[in-house]
Amino acid sequence: MGGARTDAELVTAIAAGNDEAFAALVDRHGAWGMSVARRFSGNEAAAEDALQESLLHLIERSGRLVIDESVRPWLYAVIRNRTLAQRRDASRTKAAEAIDLPADPPGQDLDDEIRRAVASLSEPLRETLILRIVDGLSVAETALALGVPEGTVKSRLSAALAALREHPALRAIF
Amino acid sequence: MPSDDHDRFEGGEAGDALRRVLTPPGLDPRVRERLLDRAAPELRRRRRAPMFWRLGANAAVAAAILLTTGMYVYFGWLAKGGAPRPTSNTVLTADVNADGVVDILDAHALARAIDAGRPGRDLDADGAITRRDADWIADQVVRLGSAG
């Protein structure tokens, strides 16, 4: 096999204890997983901890995990559940309501507006938009990750785009 | 909004802007290292697991062979007459004076030994070696004599 291994192949190798397969999976999804954990978690350390636990859970379940295209829908749900459980445990629900999107590079007004606009969306709309548009999951994968019907993904996406178009600074590009 | 609009959005300037702003930076190498370190023991355990199951399977086969052999020997032994009859050795535990027969002399020998502070076997199994053990021998000898 010449190309990169699929997620399903990596997970199968991980089930047999293959270190390289696990490293490849981390390289492919680690940054994304960390960003998901950051969005739900109160701080960087908690996000890293949630990601570690989620990946350990993946190793534990790897022998029984059925992956179609990407491991992301499954991993998203696990990371989200872990971080929300952490928040409940730490009674930091209110502090974590403010999402942690990537830090602002200085002097980029439009980018700042985009961050603010996305952060102002409700969590269901924001998560749908990010998974579908930024993370590149298909509608079906997004639905799987969020545990909702595909029709709900489409309607949320429409609502998110409509809300973004409300922002005067973004109207030109949205 | 129809799906076509979503697709145009995804592939257009707005989608590019969202991805540019919201795509996460690469994973911090230190975070990556910690992830790999934490996963290493679990991966090692999974590599060892098949070996463990192979050893377990071999042990099960060995146990089955031993069990089969044991049952074969045991039932063969039963077929040949069952549990062994008491041998002269087992009977002669009461042969205190070691002359090859259990008789009233053994009762006397045990009584003398007890008197001399050299108790032997607790033959009546009452937890103590006393003259009653000597009496027990005498009783057995009388009983044997009566039966004969």
Image (cartoon, coloured by chain):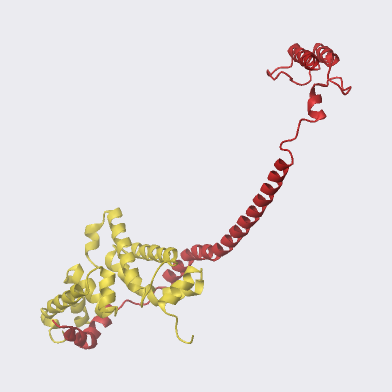
Chain colours: A yellow, B red
Q: Position of residue B84 (x, y in %)?
A: 75, 35
Confirm whether residue A103 shows in the render. Answer: no
Residue in the foreground of this view, choosing between B122 and B82: B82
Residue B99: name its quadrant: top right
**Who is closer to the viewer here, B74 or A106?**
B74
Q: Position of residue A115 (x, y in %)?
A: 21, 76
In this rendering, position of residue B58 left or right of residue A74: right
Q: Is residue A79 left or right of residue A23?
A: left
* Rendered residue at 25%/85% (across/down): B16
Which one is in front, B4 or A162? B4
Q: In the displayed structure, does residue B50 sit left or right of residue B69? A: left
**Residue sitting at 41 percent across and 76 percent down?**
A7
- On the question of residue B74 being in view, the answer is yes
Quarter of the image with the C terminus of chain A is: bottom left
Image side of residue B61 versus residue A165, left or right: right
Residue B66 x/y as whole percent: 67, 51
Q: Residue at x 19, y 78 (%)?
A: A114
The single residue placed furthest to the right in the displayed view is B99
Residue B87, given in percent of the width and then of the height, sits at 80, 31
